[in-house]
Image (cartoon, grey):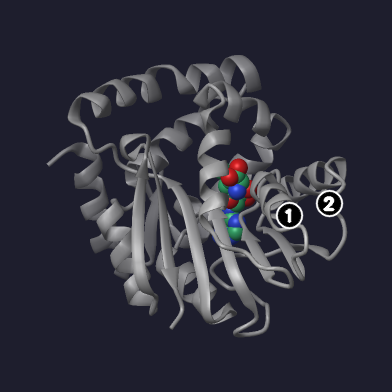
Amino acid sequence: MSDAKNSRAKNSSAKSSNSTHFGFQQVGIEEKVTKVNNVFSSVADNYDLMNDAMSLGIHRLWKRSFVSMASLHPGDKLLDLASGSGDIAIKIAQSCPKYGELAVTDINADMLEQAKKNLLDNGIIDKVKFEIADAQDLQFPDAYFDSAFMSFGLRNVADKQRALNSVYSKLRSGGHFWVLEFSHPTNATLAKVYDSYSFNVIPKLGQWLAKDEASYQYLVESIRMHPTQEELKDMFIKAGFINCHYYDISMGIVAIHKGVKP
Ligand SMILES: C[S@@+](CC[C@H](N)C(=O)[O-])C[C@H]1O[C@@H](n2cnc3c(N)ncnc32)[C@H](O)[C@@H]1O
C-alpha cells in the first residue's frame, strides 16, 4: 500500500476518535478547521496568481468544463460552496445570466472578500448573496436550491460526509450537486511525474510567489489524502444521492462528481 493510501486507511479508522487529517498530520476536527482557515487567510491575497502558476492556467479549463456540465435554467436558485475568490460563481452567472438567486459562500471571510471583489469587477451583483457558511452545517432552508457546486473545497472540509449530507438537505428533489476536486491519476507513470512536480515544485513556488511554503505543502498533502473517485462516489450514495457519476479529467488529476437528489 502506498504511503498516501496507508494514511487514508488510518484516517478512516481514526474518525471514530474525533480526529481527521490536515495534510499528512493527524489532528482533531476543530484543530483542522482552524488550520485550514489559517491556510486560506494566508493565501487569500495571492490565491488567483498561485492557481495560475501551479496549474499553468489549466485550472481555468477544468472550471469551465465543470460549470458547462450542469444544465442550468432561468430562475434557478444556485449555491456555490467554498467559493474562494469566486471563479465558479462568476462562471455560473455567465452561463445562466437569468438565474433566480446565486448564493456565494465560504467559511473564510478573507476568501469571501476576494469573491466579492471579483464578482463586482465582473458586474455580477444582481440577486447575489454573499454568506459565510460552513459546508458541513448549512443554514439555508431545506429543499431550497436547484443546484449546488463545490470546486476544490471538499478536500479541505474536516467531515466530508457531513458536508455531503448537509448539501443534500438544502437541495430540492431533482436538484444536482456538482463537485470538482483534485483526485487520483489513473496512469502510474503520470502519477509519478505528478507526485514529483507536486512535492518538489509547488511548495517552492508557494515560497517564491506567495512567501508561504507551508500552505502549499498542505495543498499537495491534502490532495493525496482525499478519497479516491470510487470512495467519494460511495459517500455521495451514502448521503442519499442517486445517479452518482464521476468524470476523470486530465487522467484523474481532477475529477468531477455529480449526484442528484431523488
Ligand atoms: C482551494 S479554495 C477553492 C476556491 C474556489 N472554489 C476555486 O475553485 O478556486 C478552497 C476554499 O474552501 C474553503 N473552505 C474550507 N473549509 C470549508 C468549509 N468547511 N466550508 C466552506 N468552505 C470551506 C476555504 O476557505 C477556501 O476558500
Left or right of 120, for residue 59? left
Q: CA distance from mark 2 to mark 1?
A: 7 Å
Q: Tag 1's secondary structure?
A: helix
**Residue found at the very far left of the displayed protein:** 1
Residue 166 appearing in the image:
yes
Circle on res. 93: 1
Question: Residue 242 location in percent, x, y?
Answer: 36, 76
Question: Residue 5 location in percent, x, y?
Answer: 21, 45
Left or right of 231, for residue 206? right
Task: Say whether marks 2 and 1 touch (CB < 8 Å).
Answer: yes
User: Which residue is depicted at the point 63% across and 17% down?
Assistant: 209
Label whose residue precedes the other's in the sequence (2 or 1):
1
Q: Nearer the viewer, residue 154 or 261?
A: 261
Q: Nearer the viewer, residue 142 or 97?
A: 97
The three-letter code of the residue at mark 1 reads Ala
Q: How many circles with numbers are drawn on the protein?
A: 2
User: Which residue is depicted at the point 74% across and 65% down?
Assistant: 99
Residue 153 appearing in the image:
no
Q: Circle 2 sits on which residue? A: 124
